[in-house]
């Protein structure tokens, strides 16, 4: 998929492709990086965030839904960068 086709995809599709590829290839680094940027992306999307990252279950829940709505749009650059690095995804 070329860059223009990737950029035309909705955020939820970018999320699904990136996360599915990372899980399938055991790319824990990307998944960990995604978890780390979610609080900042939520803040950028105008959502109140709980800065306590010890709430792992809430963070994982956010990661699953991280392709939807304003959060998905805030994370769009993260997904695009990862998918550009892995064009086979």
Image (tube, grey):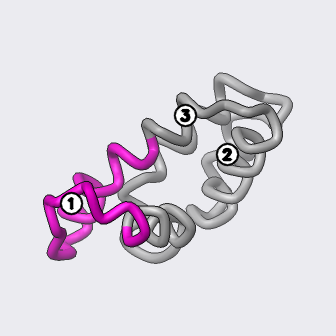
Give the camera-side residue of 28 and 66: 28
Q: Is residue 86 above or below residue 42?
A: above
Task: Give the position of the C terminus as an image quadrant.
Answer: top right
- Residue 18 is tagged as 2
Instruction: Using residue 34 as the reference point, say whether residue 19 is left or right of it.
Output: right
Rounded to the nearest angstrom, the CA distance separating label 1 from label 2 is 21 Å
**Tag 1's secondary structure?**
helix
Sort mark 2 into few (<14), some (14-19) or many (20+) by Cα contacts within 10 Å: many
* Magenta stretch in the rendered image: 34-58
The residue located at (66%, 35%) in the rendering is 83
Please tell me whether mark 2 sits on a helix, a strand or a loop: helix
Decide: marks 1, 2 in contact (CB < 8 A)?
Answer: no
Earlier sequence position, callout 2 versus callout 3: 2
Residue 66 at x, y percent in the picture? 49, 65
On the image, which quarter does residue 11 sit in?
A: bottom right
Residue lying furthest top: 85
Query: What residue do we see at 64% from left, 54% from top?
Result: 14
Checking the image for residue 58, the label placed there is: none
Mark 3 or mark 1: which comes first in sequence? 3
Mark 3 lies on residue: 30
Does dot 3 land on a helix, a strand or a loop? helix
- Nearest to the eye among marks 3 and 1: give it: 3
- Please tell me which of labels 1 and 2 falls first in the chain: 2
Name the quarter where the N terminus is drawn: top right
Q: Are marks 3 and 1 in contact (CB under 8 Å)?
A: no
Look at mark 1 in the image and give the residue it sits on: 44
Image height check: is 46 above or below 43? Answer: below
Question: Are circles 2 and 3 on residues that touch, CB within 8 Å?
Answer: yes
Picture residue at 66% right of the left edge, 49% below the top: 19
- In the rendered image, residue 19 lying in the magenta stretch gets the answer no
């Amino acid at each position: 998929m070329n860059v223009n086709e990737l950029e035309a995809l909705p955020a939820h599709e970018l999320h699904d492709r990136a996360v599915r590829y990372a899980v399938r290839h055991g790319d824990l680094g990307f998944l960990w990086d995604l978890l780390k940027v979610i609080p900042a992306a939520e803040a950028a999307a105008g959502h109140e965030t709980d800065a306590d990252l010890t709430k792992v279950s809430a963070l994982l829940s956010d990661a699953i839904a991280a392709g939807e709505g304003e959060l998905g749009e805030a994370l769009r650059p993260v997904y695009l960068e990862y998918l550009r690095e892995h064009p086979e995804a």
